[in-house]
Amino acid sequence: MTSSTQEFPVFVMCGRDPQKRRLLLSVDPDGEYKSKALLPFLGKRLIEWQLEELKESPFVEGLYLLGLTEEDVSFDYPVAYIPVASTAGFGEKLVQGLDYLQTQGIGPELVVISSCDAPGIRLQEINTFSQMVRDDPGKDFYLSLVPEEVAEAVFPRSGRAVARFKDCDVFPGELYALSPKAIRELKRVIEDLGMTRRKINRQAQKISLGPMLMYIGRRPRTWILILKYLLGLATLEDGERILSAAFGIKIRGLIIPEAGFGMDMDLPEDYERLKDYVRRTKLTPEEG
């Protein structure tokens, strides 16, 4: 069957890097937890904060965990466990996820991808993002974008990789949607850019789109637009055109003005800052 255009399967990325990152070395020095997803966080496992919001959305067809098994963790609500190696490459996991959906008779037009370590994401923004995707059909890649000024007001010096356009300064949010075509055809690109993002986060410093520009600059037809970006004259729409031309797919950026939607947990300080944020936004005074 083909899933409804109003509902999307959600791949929740639950794996880890081959080498332990600073967060786990700090929070879990004894290696008790297989994945960051399982870390304790305000009385729950870290991943539960996100799953509990996602499962309430009318736009979510199902939750598919990539990198964990039922032996690792179970829940009181339906989830599917996709058998992939915890440390497999990001693009490879997505392809295996698609293969799993195919075995279940599910042929989605789009798949939503979520990290497991963004406990600040709320149902309201999940629905807003999903509605924006549904209202603008025909794209292969929908990238949620959080305005830098919105995030910095809540998480000063957050260290995100910021794209600076004439009309906005933004960085990627923690939900995005890809078509099966984009996943299968751009697996290598996804791997390369995923690794770039991990390096950025480990360095914990704000940078420009340098690594991205180096990659897409291999396509001569993008050079004028790249120059426009470097001169500070490009708009977000120009950025969409650059990426669409470079990768041969249709790309749309969707602005989500909510700090928690763009904050994941890569560094030890993120763990504490997100604890404070979740206490303020999701817990009652009694619970906090």
Image (cartoon, grey):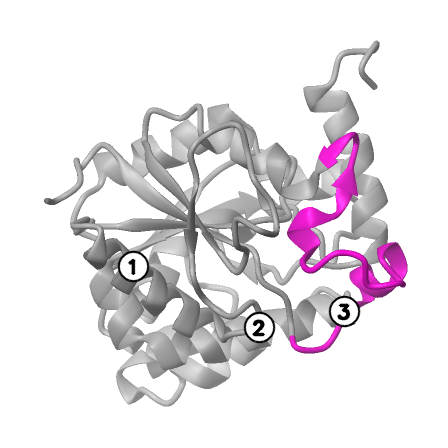
Q: Residue at x 80, y 60 (%)?
A: 23
Secondary structure under the numbered disc 3 in the rendered image: loop
Residue 62 among those drawn in magenta: no
Q: Amino acid at mark 3?
A: Arg
Please provide percent x and percent y for residue 114.
48, 49
Discs 2/3, front? 2
How far apart marks 1 and 3 lie (CA) works out to 29 Å
At a point 41% along the width and 72% down the height, the residue shown is 91
Q: Which numbered tag is attached to residue 100?
A: 1
Judging by the rendered image, the residue that carries numbered circle 2 is 87
The residue carrying pointer 1 sits among few (fewer than 14), some (14 to 19) or many (20 or more) residues within 10 Å by Cα, namely: some
In the rendered structure, which segment of residues is drawn in magenta?
18-44
Q: Is residue 228 visible?
A: no
Asked if the residue at tag 2 contacts the one at tag 1, i.e. Cβ–Cβ closer than 8 Å, the answer is: no
Gap between marks 1 and 2, in whole Å?
18 Å
Kindly report the distance in space between the C-alpha atoms of the residues bearing marks 2 and 3.
13 Å
Q: Position of residue 204 (x, y in %)?
A: 77, 65
* Residue at 26% in and 64% down: 99
The residue where tag 3 is placed is 21
Which residue, as the protein is rendered here, is positioned at the far left?
1
